[in-house]
Amino acid sequence: MDFIVLTKVGGFFLWRWLVEILGLIMEVLFRFTNMFGIMNIGLCILLFTVVSKTILLPLSIKQQKSSKLINVMQPELQAIQKKYKGKTDNESAMKMNVETRAVYEKYGTSMTGGCLPMLIQLPIMFGLYQIIYKIPAYVSSVRHYFDLVTAKLPADYMSNPVFQSLGESVTLQNKDFSNMNVVIDMLYRLTDKQWNQLIGAFPDIANVVTESGENVVQGIIRMQQFLGMNISYTPLNIITGYFSEGNGTILTVITAAMIPILSGLFQWYSTKLITVNQPAQNSDDPSANMMKSMNITMPLMSVVFCFTFPLVIGIYWVASSLYQVVQQIGMNAYLSKVDVDEMIRKNVEKANKKRAKKGLQPTKVSTITQNLQKMQEAEAKEQAKMSEKIERSRKIVEESTKYYNQDAKPGSLASKVNMVQKYNEKHNKK
């Protein structure tokens, strides 16, 4: 059961600050559940998912409103792409960019408007994973239990063969076990069986209790139990352990198998619900076809990965995807009632305030109907010009043919001789 566990995340101070805040939220949840006599990592991750997703809800709404607006803009954007299709020179590229920006400006949005909420959400999502991977590093209520254990380790604990074996069984980026943070990283990954091995090597650990009189090791094992399974195990460990060693029950095997499957199903369905509000894709567009494939392959990949990741990750994925499904159903109902014309008007007003600060002229608010009508009128004028040009060419050819075929049967040898003769006469007169 190899798994990388690290101490607190390093890097840029803003990144560390963000993860610390998320860790503080998890700490509050642990203290809250402890008020009711419950301290369970799996339960707190479920609550953590609800809280974090709720915090990100305004960004999700903004992003999907932008997608709905782009869906309205799509005919004009596609018309511009069609206009410059096959033109690779710099001048055409610049014109295409200017016209595209003009369309976005007309609707009071920007080319990066839909990406910004997603870019804000990404570091928060990665921060959530840091917390889930390293609960003791960020949640003092949990770390306290492990500190009581490490305090009872003898001075020569690193030379103990059992400790060395347990240290080798867990993949750590840092294996300096003189650092107690690294020791706690290792202890957090131990299974029930490995805890028994540790107690056998260091009997004093078995007698460690908290201030309330609770046995520390039993408390740690209890915190890591969820639906009758240790969250440090992988679903694959539980399934193979049942069939090879008779560990657990058939119910735990079914539950362990259902977690990755539910994770994939909920992810697939939530993605399907999200695409309702996204711009319609051209079936001939390779990127659109690639996106459709990814919407299927990514949930399948998550199922495979989830079987080999600790249950704590699977629990988060299932909870996150299920929350996303429920949230998306409500969001779709809300977005279906949104007046896009009113949204455009508000967007343009905000854009005009920014333009006024830059000393630029305000853009005019126009409705979808007006925009589409203008686009259709422009297309009709273009088609009328093309039809007029074709008609003129047709008349010129018709008059020329009639002139050269006169006094002779069309298509006959005489008409061809006559055609040459009249051509010469016509040019001699000049």
Image: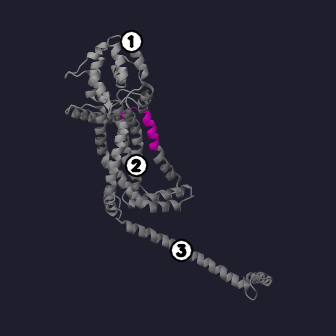
Identify which amino acid the numbered label 3 is placed on: Lys
Report, in whole angstroms, how far the alpha carbon at label 1 lies from the one at label 2: 51 Å
In the picture, the quarter occupied by the C terminus is bottom right
Camera-side mark, 2 or 3: 2
- SS class of the residue under badge 3? helix
Report, in whole angstroms, how far the alpha carbon at label 2 lies from the one at label 3: 48 Å
User: Does the rendering let one see residue 403?
Assistant: yes
222 or 352, nearer to the observer: 222
User: Does the rendering let one see residue 22?
Assistant: no
86 sits left or right of 413 in the view = left
256 or 311, nearer to the observer: 256
The picture places residue 307, in percent across and down from the top left corner, at 43, 35
Identify which amino acid the numbered label 1 is placed on: Asn
Quick one: label 1 or label 2, which is nearer the N terminus?
1
Q: Which residue is mark 3?
A: 385
Whether residue 177 is situated above or below residue 404 in the rendered picture: above
In the drawing, what numbered circle is on residue 269? 2
Disc tally is 3
Q: Which residue is mark 1?
A: 160
Furthest residue in direction bottom, as rendered: 407
Q: Residue at x 34, y 33 (%)?
A: 132
Q: Residues within 10 Å of mark 1 (few under 14, many from 20)?
A: few
The picture places residue 315, in percent across and down from the top left corner, at 35, 37
Q: Which residues are magenta?
A: 298-313
- SS class of the residue under badge 2? helix
Residue 305 shown in magenta: yes
Identify which amino acid the numbered label 2 is placed on: Tyr
Residue 425 shown in magenta: no
The picture places residue 52, in percent across and down from the top left corner, at 30, 41
